[in-house]
Image: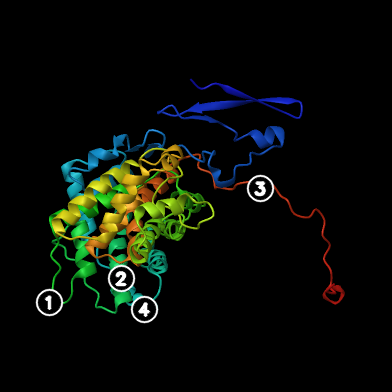
Amino acid sequence: MPGNATLSVDGQTYELPTLVGSEGEKAIDISKLRDRSGYITYDPGLGNTGMCKSSITYIDGDKGILRYRGIPIEQFANHPNFIEVAWLLINGRLPQPEELAGFSAKLTANAPLHEAMRHHFEGFPVNAPPMAVVSAMISTLACFHHQFLTIEDDAHFEELAARLISKVRTIAAYAYKRSQGRPFIYPDPRLRYCANFLHMMFSMPYDQYLVDPDIEDALNLIFILHADHEQNCSTTTVRVVGSSKANLFASCAAGVSALWGPLHGGANVEVMEMLDKIHKGGVTPEAYLAQAKDKSNPARLMGFGHRVYKNYDPRAKLLQQACERVFAKLKRKDPLLDIARKLEELALKDPYFVDRKLYPNVDFYSGLIFRAIGIPTEMFTVMFVIGRLPGWIAQWKEQHDMESGKIVRPRQVYTGKTINDFVPMEQRIKA
């Protein structure tokens, strides 16, 4: 039960209320600490700071648990439906059949981009980073859909959510087509969400890409597994920007920029680069693990370990199984997959990695599936954006609906000079 914590500092004692979450997570409420004591807490990286209360996603990193709205992530694997999960995250419950059908119809209707917006892609260099294009074009959506810069009610918000979730895949596919110098392919209203995205990515005029149902399921699963992950860097960015009452377009564009960082959304790219380096260098998995354990060697075992999970990432287990199904269906061999299998087998038996709780994470197999489907490495993080967007929308809405929502404004511990007088230009003489 909630109670109080006692803090003693400078001879004074302060009673601080405690909070207990629905899964037993404990927190000390320090929201009035500075007013009462003059002290703030110091927590670089905010790894021990809870900035919000949320009912969307629950993670237990020690036990390897991930749940969306209380539903274990494993329960979405047999019949993966990304749009159903998106609805769940945003609305807090599973949809009724008519609700899912209605939301899907909105996605279909909103898949095309305004033709004027379509021409914006031509202003980007052909070799422009796809993440830069996606972030810019999500911001540009605000110019073409400014009726959603303020939200009137839940029905209005659902229209906005449908536009964003639908159009982001069109933006992503157009960014890829632009980088290849190939013609843009319009969305096909007869196709479902993931199949339509693959159609826009890989079809050519008079040569439509036929989507295999198993590949469609694999992509649905990847998007589901990336849909939300509690208060990670990009989600926190969306909340921080949204706390200023910035619109959803601006907030999600900021989330894209945060996800662009190699320490966040770019991890599966680093996994593929590692596997490719091992393959081309003729290094055995055994030898590479020995290098990774050598602190004087720059080699690192990418795709293992996680900031939160100190157990096997539950998403990685599902992706490992999906990876095997995809390669079996395509009847394709990939030396990088063989290397990945061996690295995992060896690392899970090696005390060095086991003692440090370094288990495969979601990035270890996702890149291999993308590669098998034909998605190039430079598009991997863009795929992450498509999957994570429903989570960002749900988190933004949760914060937006809070009556007591405050703008995020952290404090700091200042370490600069106390007084430093201005010196006129003529008196500034280099020593």
Earlier-in-chain disc, 3 versus 1: 1
Earlier-in-chain disc, 2 versus 3: 2
Which amino acid does the dot numbered 1 rest on? Tyr
Which amino acid does the dot numbered 3 rest on? Gln
Can I make out residue 302 in this image? no
Q: Mark 3 points at which residue?
A: 412
Secondary structure beneath disc 2? helix
| Residue shown at the point (40%, 28%) measured from the top left | 23
Decide: few, some or many residues near mark 3? Use Cα within 10 Å; few <14, some 14-19, many ≥20. few
Disc 4, disc 3: CB below 8 Å? Answer: no
Q: Nearer the viewer, residue 258 or 304?
A: 304
Disc 1, disc 4: CB below 8 Å? Answer: no
Q: Position of residue 402 (x, y in %)?
A: 45, 40
Q: Nearer the viewer, residue 269 or 347?
A: 347
Earlier-in-chain disc, 1 versus 4: 4
Q: Name the residue under label 2.
A: 176
Task: Judge left or right: residue 378 versus residue 104.
Answer: right
The mark found on residue 126 in the picture is 4
Earlier-in-chain disc, 4 versus 3: 4
Which amino acid does the dot numbered 2 rest on? Tyr
Q: Where is residue 175 in the image (x, y as percent from the top left)?
A: 33, 70
- Give how far apart the Cα atoms at labels 1 and 4 are: 24 Å
- Give how far apart the Cα atoms at labels 2 and 3 are: 41 Å
Decide: few, some or many residues near mark 1? Use Cα within 10 Å; few <14, some 14-19, many ≥20. few
Earlier-in-chain disc, 2 versus 4: 4
Task: Judge left or right: residue 113 versus residue 352.
Answer: left
Q: In which quarter of the image is the C terminus?
A: bottom right
Q: Mark 1 points at which residue?
A: 206
